[in-house]
Image (cartoon, coloured by chain):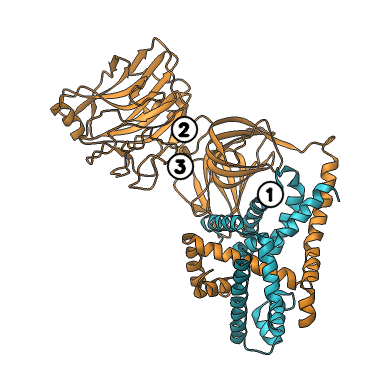
Amino acid sequence: MSEISSRAAALLMRHYPSLYGYVYVLLGNHVDAEDALQEVAMVVARKFGELEHEDDFLPWARGIARIEVLSAKRRRARLPALADPVALQAMSDAAHDVDQATVWSERHAALQKCVEALPAESQQLIRLRYSDECPDVETLARRVNRTVSATYGLLKRIRQLLRDCVERKLAESH
Amino acid sequence: MPADRDADTIAEYLDGQLAPEEAVAFRDRVVSDPIFARALYLAAVDEAFLRAQARGDGESRPKAATAGWRSRFRRTYRVVGLAVLAASLLFVCWSIWPSSTPREQVARVERMTACQWADGTIPRGSVALGQAFQLRSGVAEFVTQTGVRTVFEGPSAFQFEGADTVRLTSGRLFCDVPRGAEGFTVQTANGRVVDLGTRFGVEIGPAGETEVHVIQGRVRTEISDSSARSELAVGQAGQFRSGSAALAMVPFQGAKFTTASGLIYEPFDYQPRLPLVGQGQWFDRDASMPSPGFETLRVLRYPELPAPRGMALNLNPSGGKATRPVGRPWPATFTSALIWIDDDFIKGMRMNRIGTVGLIGFGQSDPAKPAVRLIVKPGKGNNELYLGLRVGDQISWSTSPQKYEETQFVVLETSGTTARLWVNPSPTSFEAETPPTADVETALSVPPTIETLWLGESGAPKFAWWQIDEIRGGFRWADVTPRAVAR
């Protein structure tokens, strides 16, 4: 792998959650989001030489992702909720604002610590929720022997705990 | 941090749990509330991080999970890494070749007028395959390797995907496809517009829809996620969205497309009740200067000219606005416009013994000193007025009186050492190679420098009002006298 392409890969991996979050919000499902990000990775690798400053990688790659989102939308029979250009622009602006104000490495480190601080059962629930094993909450509910609504309630509570924990840790570190 | 209810709504969206009507409200909230949109993005990135961690290991081992988050995170990225690796291999192959096989050049920049580009760089020379552009304002003209002339109006976003394909993401595009280049394709998010030997315009509408207007020849439309295929002929227009069962016919408005860089079209179709300054390229030299509002009254029409889409701009409303000129860059030698003068305007001139009033001025930076002006004076008859040209102290009037409270179509030329005015020219002359005989022609001792068009006149009286619409600028008579349907 050339030096340039390995840098592209490193930057893409570093910013993967941000790019995935952006694409997922717009497309509304993981299958399309993953397909779109595969395309983004290809374009990033091919065009990386055009990027003047690596500090600009995330907005640059998000621009590529935006084009891929439009392409992915074209292939879909049912448009996602945020498919129109106005919503797309609103989300792009929001992503830009958040990226400017967030040190992602700090936030991810805080989130990781907060997950590790959860009770084991909650950790398992979170891991199952986001793994390939349980593509939806119904499957997850069956897996953990709970009702769907109870599982939603648990997930909601865990997310709330994680959100509070991350904000607290970030506030403490500044 | 979002409120609990907002956080729950966001979680439901990310889980795909919103009902269709809730999804609509959710979308509206995202568009109208930037804080909510930021909370959504933040939550989605957090979830993406958690997902990336979790997908690295399918085992259910709580304790081990705690110890293994970091290693699983690295393993998860192997998936991405593979994609990147594959892409990188392509990249390496690509990067080995440039010295002997340069990236394919698919088009060249032909001409640009008043262009501003999103990244601040100015495209020059050749356009490489896949090169993307974001034109904020102005008009940019490119010619593909196959000879297709493409004219983009800002704001627009587009990308050349080959010498025979351009992708239009937003904005407006005109294509002139020569013989031998048939099949040229405009790709949009909603489908494709395929040339069948023609001149046509494509526009991405405010809601993302694709609209095509055939100015000459025929095109075929192919709608994404649909088997719908349609053909449009000259004078026809259609609109479609991805997944539509069929093309929806819409009124033809071919004249709204700028057909060459350097041509200007100002339809004043802005949001009503706003000042003009800040819309399009209109500016105001003095922030305290009152500006014309859009208290619109009527649509101005002239035989054989394309019908305006919206109302005209109202100047000198009775509230006293627009008592001083408002301007915009004007890199053109021919200008046409539809104007309508209220009876109180002419009566006010008579009562106040005002000889002439300037309507449109052409000059440099000082609105008080236009080099050439379109002027008006009352006629002898009760409902008559005369239009004329003022160049310095030299005034020339059209010999035939016109009626007030009727639409007047005026064409002006300000090039070299001649200024010319046509008032209500015959539609038979429209789009002719050479203009008909002018109603007014004034020789200039020194060729004026025309950089700006001004509406109104410094110190203009505050009585009554007049209206203007469909201002066009170009370099030939034909540029500013388009027919509603090409012959």
Residue under the point 70% across and 87% down: A144
What colour has chain A? cyan
Subunit that carries the residue with mark 1: A
Residue designated by label 1 = A55
Badge 3 vs badge 2, beta-carbon distance below 8 Å = no
Q: Is residue A81 visible?
A: no
User: Which mark is first along the chain, 2 or 3?
Assistant: 3
State the SS at label 1. Answer: helix
Q: Quadrant of residue A18?
A: bottom right
- Position of B253 with respect to B200 (left or right) is left
Circles 2, 1 touching at the beta carbon (< 8 Å): no
- Look at discs 3 and 2 and give the one toward the viewer: 2
Question: On the image, numbered disc 3 is attached to which residue?
Answer: B253
Element type where label 2 sits in the image:
strand
**In the displayed structure image, the side of residue A52 where residue A4 appears, left or right:** right
Q: Chain of mark 3?
A: B
Spatial CA distance of label 2 from label 1 is: 39 Å
For the residue pair A69 and B478, the one nearer the viewer reads as A69
Q: Is residue A56 above or below residue A154?
A: above
Q: Residue at x 20, y 34 (%)?
A: B463
Give the colour of chain B: orange
- In space, the residues marked 1 and 3 are separated at their CA atoms by 45 Å
- Residue ID at (58%, 60%): B243
Rendered location of residue B178, percent (x, y): 63, 33
